Image: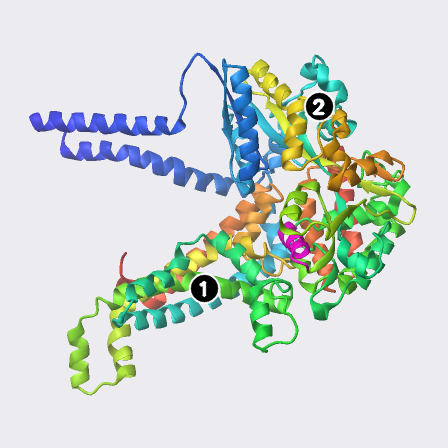
Amino acid sequence: MRLKKMKAITLLLSAVLTVGLIAGCGGKQASDKVTIRMIESLTSPKRTELIQAMLDKFQEDNPNIKVELISPPFDQADNKIRTMLGSKEEIDILEVRDLNVAEFVNNGYIEPLDAYTDKWSDFATVSAVSKSVGTVGGKMYFLPNGLYQRQMFYRADWFKEKGLNPPTTWEELYETAKKLTDPSKNRFGFSFRGGAGSNGTTDSMILAYNGDKVNLEDSMFTKDGATIYSTPEAKAAMELYLKLYKDASPPDSINWGFQEQVQAFTSGVTAILLQDPDVIQSLQEKMEEGTWATAPLQTGPTGKALFAAGGAGWGMSSKSKHKEEAWKLIEYLSSPEVNTKFSKDYGLIPLHTTATEDEFFKTGPYKTLIDMSDKPDTFVNYKPAFEYPGNGQWGQVAMETGQALLLNKATLDETLKKWDSYWVEQKANLKQ
Amino acid sequence: MNNRKIILTGLIPALLLVLVFTYYPFLRGIIMAFQEYKLFNLSNVHFIGIDNFKNAFQDPKFIMALQNSAYWVFCSLILQFLLGLTLALMLKRKFRGRGIYQGLVFYSWALSGFLIGMIWKWMFNSQIGVINDLLLRIGLIHQRIGFLSEQKWAMMSVIIANVWYGVAFFAIMLLAALQSVPSELYEAAEMDGAGGVRRLWNITLPYIKPTIISTLMLRAIWIFNDPSLIYGLTNGGPAGSTHILSSLMLEHIIYGGDYGAASAIGIIMIVILLLYTIFFLSVTKAEKAGEF
């Protein structure tokens, strides 16, 4: 009898323990404060530190709001965010990226911010590009926390040695890079990127060559509705691309991604690098001052360079129970003062147009980006094809077929045909 | 309550956990393999019969990944086993600093596959990698080799990295087995005049055979299933030439958000492993395989 009782108690206890353990792992706690849960996507230790500092300041000013920051490792962040949203976990603010905003909107995960921005006094100075990045179907879904925009970095010392000027067209870039290439010295003109993200180069060349033909709002297509890959200009661009790889780039770069591309530049293997401003800090750390400089993007034969500003920013979950408080935090993070400081500290283009008056952005490596925005006739901003479901996979498709082309396993015509039909199909799927 | 009932009720929590976290996802995966299930469009999930499987077999990338998987598992396994066995035999003898040496040898097993992929990616780099630099300096090559960018080298290079990763596992398991071989057997054999090779062949190997069989089987399954090294090293490149089935499956999820296509590949992998296990166990006579 006693034994049975003991056993029953033990059983009960262990059941309680199990339930307690499982519940405890959830880590929820009740308090009279409002708790805002926020998750970031482009995580890096330094960035998390900067964000946490901003949040600390916000919580000091708003003692009734507690902010819980979730920082998953960068590689898994977007999947984690998706899973949390999909399983309706409580999350109030999330970092939305240009490349997944359409997906989140499609699935009804995020809330349009227009009702809030209408009442926000600083919204007037938010740059047009920032607004366009965060907008899907006419509604604004996130406020970028900084923009990424490509420019050219080059070895000023090597250029001087050979008496070269920074190239202004793609054709010139090829000629210049070729002159700087000397495989016997392990020196190459161009920091090529054939691995992940290779379409950053192929697409921007093809867009520049198509120039005025491109429909800027639907940038994978021309104004006539054909894909940008179907034109003779695309073929000319890709012929130059092939020459650029064969004559002026390290053969190994067929498989290079972001890290290798930047590393080759900082370690003195390559002379020209096309990258976003977030590499500026690592260039400043690893290279001697005066050995490198920046220049604007290259134009195509018609004198146009098309560029897209990309970015990520703060959006609001549609399931959030504290939308007012969440907006308060987004507004704080997006205010001219806070955002400009963050952009400076992390190396991004700020959200507000007023920030460009800051001395910091008028000199040094950022100046080129401001210069580019002063010449809107040459440097034309386009909207990337983020509203197409297939855009996420495009990088992978372009990379694999592009590598097959570089390895001579496919002809240029075949490759362009594949790219053309990929986007024709995307268009057809979207219309359904 | 009688004892039986108590035991059964006690099992419920564990059973529930296994059901929820193992069998439910497994079943869900099987269902997804027959659905159009794309992350971008979750409002339109529907059954499409065996289309996902058809698409897989019509995709040249899948066929290539299938061939690569066979090559990858076979070469990695054989080399890992042979080197691991050699290492274990060498470590069996006592010598000064054996403990430290063992620790150093086994350390690769403690690293994550993804990290190993990243490390080897830099070492294999043709412009700034240490392997090319070394080979150039000792004069073995005169031209830099693109280990990961030339197709004739790429698959071999990822296998080399994988061998480095897995040797430690075999060394650990086989060393443990070797240490359990009674020394009397060797003494007796020596008295009968058996040489080193003879002793290895007639005593050591038969004695540790059960361990060899189980480790070979387990390791083959792990190598087949583990995409982390390839994901970190080449991500399937150049032009898809180093994809194995598991890395291709991962690609469908990460870049395509296509859980249907990925699940179909997952099911195909399960079938392959099932056939392999049945074949392997019947050939090696399962009852002799040890447990651990």
Quadrant for the C terminus of chain A in the image = top right
Residue holding disc 1: B164
Name which quarter of the figure residue B183 lies in.
bottom left
Callout 1: helix, strand or loop?
A: helix
**Badge 1: residue crowd in 10 Å (few <14, some 14–19, many ≥20):** some
Q: Are marks 2 and 1 on the same chain?
A: no
Give the residue at the far left of this rendering. A1
Numbered disc 2: secondary structure: strand
Residue B43 on image: x %, y %: 61, 29
Residue B254 magenta-highlighted: no
Estimate the x, y position of residue B217 in percent, counting from the top left: 38, 61
What secondary structure characterizes most of the magenta part? helix
Label 2 vs label 1: CA separation?
Answer: 51 Å
For the residue pair B26 and A41, the one nearer the viewer reads as A41
Left or right of A129 in this view: A113: left
Residue receiving disc 2: A140
Q: Residue at x 90, y 40 (%)?
A: A212
User: Which residue is more in the foreground, B243 or B50?
Assistant: B243
Q: Is residue B38 above or below residue A354?
A: below
Q: Residue furthest bottom?
A: B193
**CB atoms of marks 2 and 1 within 8 Å:** no
Residue B289 image position (x, y, % from top left): 28, 63
Q: Residue at x 12, y 25 (%)?
A: A5
Count all numbered tags in the image, as a single digit.
2
Image x and y of residue B84, in percent? 37, 68
Residue nearest the viewer, comparing A95 with A219: A95
Segment colored magenta: A256-268
**Front position in the image: B71 or A315:** A315
Badge 1 amino acid: Trp
A216 above or below B224?
Answer: above
Q: Which amino acid type is marked by label 2?
A: Met
